[in-house]
Image: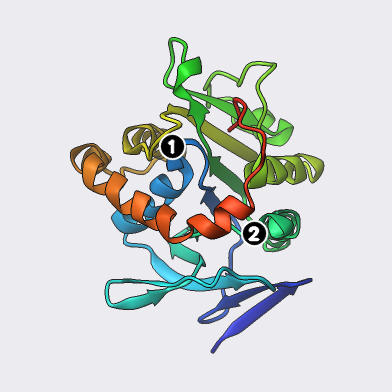
Amino acid sequence: MESKNLYGDLEFVFNEPQNFEGCTLLNGWHGIGECGFISMSHLVDKLNAERIGYIITSNIPQFITIKNNRITFPFEIYRKDDIVIILPIFEPIKSEHLIFTKSVVQWSIDNKFKQAILVGGLDRRLKEDVELKAIYTKAFREKRTDVEIPFLEEGLYVTGPLAYMLMFYELHDFEALALLPYAERSRPDPVAASIAVSEINNILNIDVNVQELLDEAEKIEKEIESLIQASKTRRDSDKDADEGMFV
């Protein structure tokens, strides 16, 4: 029996009613190195997660593709036990970033998720002596003192959907963490995505193999480049003019 949750102009559609209490929400976007998208896609595949639903917006991108002989949607929701993954094949158009992220945050809180782990990327030209940095909400930092990833330093900024989600989770005093591996700005970076997945393994005490990301880096890069090219016209018209050192 199909189930729907309405949040303004967003519609969360599920194949059947779901109980998300105590679950962890994973989400990543098309930022530097495509780290968020690559890591979420890899987790979906290696966890053998089931597609349980999708998100419909007023201006949903007019793109679909085929995977495993099945139509994919721009914004899909997958689940494996208590891990729920929102996989954005494409990003919402810029004018919907605010309502999209605000609705996802409110939906996860209303459905009693335990925590959220988000993935972005940092420009590798800024790399220091560690492979990734993190941003914590106050609630996450207080409850998960075992997670000791270095903080993102002052003076660097997060932008786009990831920034909105961190902002709203902080405002709601919700446990959320953003993982920011250093990545190549100019191309998809599966190696950086593997660093994020490895850290998710540590945080959630799971064992998702990342070797395939390393072994098939070139193939993955070509697939992502093809996806980027397919939506280039839409993304170019929606692109920020600022090309600074942003997540």
Q: Residues within 10 Å of mark 2 (few under 14, many from 20)?
A: some
Q: Amino acid at mark 2?
A: Ile
Comparing 41 with 48, the one in front is 41
In the visual, does 152 lie left or right of 227? right
Q: Is the residue 236 above or below the residue 143 in the image?
A: below
Q: Secondary structure at mark 2?
A: loop
| Residue 63 percent coordinates (x, y) | 48, 70
Q: Residues within 10 Å of mark 1 (few under 14, many from 20)?
A: many
| Residue 87 percent coordinates (x, y) | 48, 58
Residue drawn at point x = 40 percent, y = 45 percent: 39
Residue drawn at point x = 36 percent, y = 44 percent: 206
Q: Is the residue 201 above or below the residue 70 in the image?
A: above
Quadrant for residue 130, please give it: top left
Q: Amino acid at mark 1?
A: Gly
Comparing 111 with 68, the one in front is 68
Q: Secondary structure at mark 1?
A: helix
- Locate the N terminus by quadrant: bottom right
Residue drawn at point x = 69 percent, y = 34 percent: 137
Comparing 205 with 104, the one in front is 104
- Answer whether labels 2 and 1 touch (C-beta < 8 Å): no
Q: Is residue 235 visible?
A: yes
Give the labeled residue for mark 1. 33
Query: Residue reaching furthest left?
Result: 215
Query: Residue reaching furthest bottom?
Result: 1
Whichever of callouts 2 and 1 sits on the residue coming sooner in the sequence is 1
Give the labeled residue for mark 2. 93
Quadrant for residue 157, please give it: top right
Comparing 52 with 92, the one in front is 92
Using the numbered discs, state the Cα–Cα distance from disc 2 to disc 1 in whole angstroms: 19 Å
Residue drawn at point x = 62 percent, y = 54 percent: 237
Q: Is the residue 56 above or below the residue 105 in the image?
A: below
